[in-house]
Amino acid sequence: MDTTDFEPDVETPSTLHTGTPVGPDSKKLAGLRANKSNVKALAGALVALGFVAAGVVIGPRLIGSPPSPAAARPLPSVAVSVPLQRDISSRLQFLGQFSAVDRVELRAQVGGTLTQISFKDGDIVHKGDLLFVIDPTPYEIRLHQATAQLAAARARLELANRESTRADSLSRTGVGSVQNADQRSAERRAAQAAVDEAEALIRDAQFDLDHTRIAAPFTGRIGSHLVSVGNLVAGSRAGTSPTTLLATLVSFETIYLDFDMSEAEYMIFARERQKQTGPLASKVKVSLSDEQDFTRQGTLDFVDNSLDRSSGTIHARATVSNGDLLLTPGGFARVRLEVAPPAPVLLVPDASVLPDQSTHVVLTVDSNNVVAPKQVELGDLRDGLRVIRSGLTPTDKIIIDGIPAVAPGAKVSPHDGSIRFASQRSEK
């Protein structure tokens, strides 16, 4: 086929298939009508799809059964128990610090050159043991001078006595004058005073000479020497001028344990002590920082006469035996003071006691299984259990386990538990 001669029928802009003449404006109007029809068709399709989706979502609710209600949450399970009741003595516990019963700073009373140290640092020395020696030569010379003065004074006294006796004899016979007798008597008294003065100088020189040797005033443990041999030390018998510190010495056979009571603790102690006539109110037990048990015994021997206004405490002191030499001045220890004989008390686990601002509460469960807090007054800790002084009754049901899952006023599901001392729990 020859395509070169083929000419398709093409409509001119001025005619349609119907043969009706159409201009450019008519052609635009036809295009707008066609677009509007397409938009309406698209909107109808979207509406139809929406109804279908709604039918998919709503349909099951319309056709199926109504939804079941949500299952109720189970009540919190807690362990409860009545307080443990035991006969326990009332006591107070404090933190104390040890101090020496006797403590002395060894200082020279006379000056001079240090010539000898007769101990090793940290030794236990006994009363009278020689510790330091200061060069005694100057004091020996002074003693010899005083001794010579005494000899001269005694010689003058002897001469004065003879002359006074002779003058008195002449005066009585009338040969000598009364004035001469009085003069010889005065010279005799002056000679006696010179002898007394010389004897005092000898004692003074002997005192200085004796204190060139410094001995231990009591049995104790000595510290390190602070002055070496060959140093010049300063001394003062009256302590009015600076002196040289040589070493310190502390006693160790018994030791003080100092502690402070608050005003409330002091009132408990004072009221209970008024009821006691025996040694109970003065009995203390001590536990060192590396000890768990209170195995050491002591005696309360001092309570101050006034409260410290700045701290609101009163100072107290106990005396403790230090036979094993483990107690050291400056160390810390816990001290328990027994203030009353054994009496029935209530005990609960320490974890069951909750702080509530400035007070403490214990959560209990009433007859309707509803949590009810009770405010309590606390005592000391006894083998993991807290003493309750007031606020609970022996029949109260205490929550001892499951506390974090409950709140006051909430209903719970209680089951029986048991309260034991920590030592009993560890044996299981």
Image (cartoon, rainbow, N blue to C red):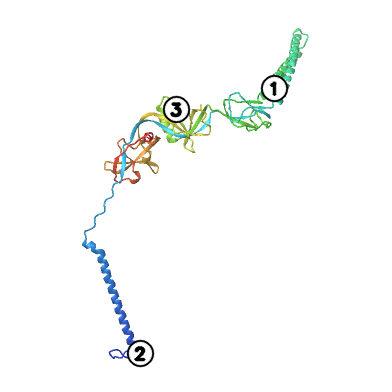
Whether residue 306 is visible here, answered yes or no, is no
Q: Are there few (<14), some (14-19), or many (20+) residues within 10 Å of tag 2? A: few
Q: Which sits earlier in the primary sequence, circle 3 or circle 1?
A: 1
Q: Quadrant of residue 248?
A: top right
C-alpha span from label 3 to label 1 = 52 Å
2 vs 3, front mark: 2
Image check: 244 left or right of 330? Answer: right
CB atoms of marks 2 and 3 within 8 Å: no
Whether 69 is drawn above or below 86: the answer is: below
What's the residue at 30%, 78% (across, down)? 38
C-alpha span from label 1 to label 2 = 165 Å
Whether residue 285 is visible here, answered yes or no, is yes
Q: Name the residue nearer the viewer: 201 or 261.
A: 261
Judging by the rendered image, the residue that carries numbered circle 1 is 201
Q: Which sits earlier in the primary sequence, circle 2 or circle 3?
A: 2
Where is residue 273 shown, x and y percent of the image?
42, 28
3 vs 1, front mark: 3
Judging by the rendered image, the residue that carries numbered circle 3 is 282
Where is residue 209 shown, x and y percent of the image?
68, 24
* SS assignment at label 2: helix
Q: Name the residue nearer the viewer: 56 or 144.
A: 56
Residue kind at label 1, given as amino acid type: Leu
How many marks can you see?
3
Q: Which sits earlier in the primary sequence, circle 1 or circle 2?
A: 2
Residue kind at label 3, given as amino acid type: Ser
Whether 374 is drawn above or below 160: the answer is: below
